[in-house]
Amino acid sequence: MTQRQPRQRDEAHLNFVRSLPCLICLDDTSTEAAHIRYAEPRAGKRWVGGQEKPDDAFAVPLCGKHHREQHTRREVEWWQWQGIDPIKVSLALFRVSGDHERGAQIVAANGSPQ
């Protein structure tokens, strides 16, 4: 059995994510950093259980309403329904962390087509 790696935390990055508009509705008044829980081996992301949060690099901006919705059904299907690849978005945001203009461009380019 392999030992679980400690979660990689980055509070500055989470604050950056919270400063961006919601990836679904573009509301920017109550954005939360929503962690992506499902596994994506191609991006080096393992699955985490209910008692554990993923690394902070795997967070995207969602308003409170959409953050709660994210957890009401199977997460992969919810994101597919939104037409968004949250792993791609989270890693793009992590790469430009701290640059609000570029972060907002990433959100706008990848946001929900609904």
Image (cartoon, grey):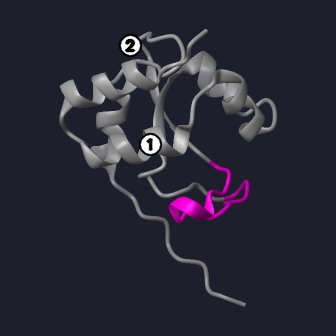
- Hey, which quadrant is residue 84 in on the image? top right
Residue 19 visible at all: no
Query: Which residue is label 2 attached to?
Result: 28
Q: Amino acid at mark 1?
A: Ser
Disc number at residue 107? none
Q: Is residue 101 left or right of residue 95?
A: left
Instruction: Sort mark 2 into few (<14), some (14-19) or many (20+) by Cα contacts within 10 Å.
Output: some
**Which residue is at the far bottom?**
1
- Hey, which quadrant is residue 106 in on the image? top left
Q: Are marks 1 and 2 in contact (CB under 8 Å)?
A: no
Q: Is residue 105 left or right of residue 32?
A: left
Instruction: Sort mark 1 into few (<14), some (14-19) or many (20+) by Cα contacts within 10 Å.
Output: many
Residue at x-position 29% and y-position 23%: 105
Q: Amino acid at mark 2?
A: Asp
Residue at x-position 67% and y-position 26%: 68
The range drawn in magenta is 37-51
Query: Which residue is label 1 attached to?
Result: 90
Residue 37 visible at all: yes
Sequence-wise first label, 1 or 2: 2
- Hey, which quadrant is residue 81 in on the image? top right
